[in-house]
Image: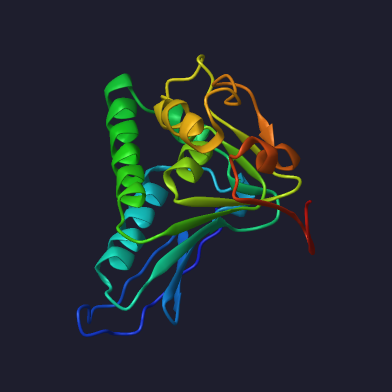
Amino acid sequence: MASATATLAPTASRTAALTLVNVLYEKKGEIAYVTVNRPKVLNALNTPTWKDLRTAFEDARDDAALRGVILTGAGDKAFIAGADISELAHVAAFEAEQSSRFGQGVLDLIENLGKPVVAAVNGFALGGGCETAMACTIRIAVGQCEIRPAGSHTWISSWRWRNATPAAAGRQRSRPAAHPVRGDDQRAGGLSYRARQRGRSVG
């Protein structure tokens, strides 16, 4: 597991250092940068990562000097490749439900932050990664990325995909819940605000 520690400079509203293990958190001017930092497991979401995301976004919400947030994943393969299966394999049904509810609470925080959140989708956004991207205000996608919601065979609900996709792409163009949407299709489908390839725009 890759790890990193980010320490924020003291502000008037928060004097204690903020220490995160699975998420990089940096402020540059009026923008906060949140990076899921588990590239060895394609930035998969486990409980400690969800907690780090909540801590980072609560800080971004409460910092009046910040105007927006950019969320992305470390490395060049994945934005967030869904839930951490190695963790799910060792939890009971009740614990899995509690974890799912906690994660949905973090997504509600992102969706209702009160400030724009840009998802820089730089690779796979699968299952929970898809829902995280959909919770953001805008999605900017690299040409080779792939966004795929959780299928009906998984225990994670794709309600955010089902509800958000028609609004973003129009009901006539929205895709079935388990259908992958690749970066080159997203601009035409309305899912991402701007599809990009590395170094140049698409279209």
Left or right of 173? Residue 166 is: left
Task: Let me know if residue 36 appears in the view.
Answer: no
Query: Residue 131 or 167: which is nearer the viewer?
Result: 167
Q: 102 above or below 55?
A: above
Residue located 41% across and 24% down the image: 157
Occupied quadrant, residue 57: bottom left
Q: How is the image coloured?
A: rainbow
Query: Residue 188 or 11: which is nearer the viewer?
Result: 188
Residue located 60% across and 23% down the image: 175
The mark tally for this picture is 0
Left or right of 66? Residue 199 is: right
Residue located 21% across and 85% down the image: 12
Task: Let me know if residue 73 appears in the view.
Answer: yes
Across and down, in percent, residue 5 comes to 45, 70
Across and down, in percent, residue 120 comes to 58, 56
Across and down, in percent, residue 192 comes to 60, 45
Left or right of 76? Residue 97 is: left
Across and down, in percent, residue 78 comes to 64, 47
Occupied quadrant, residue 200: bottom right
* Extreme-top residue of the structure: 153
Residue located 51% across and 14% down the image: 153
Q: 118 above or below 186?
A: below
Q: 105 above or below 180?
A: below
Q: 164 above or below 196?
A: above
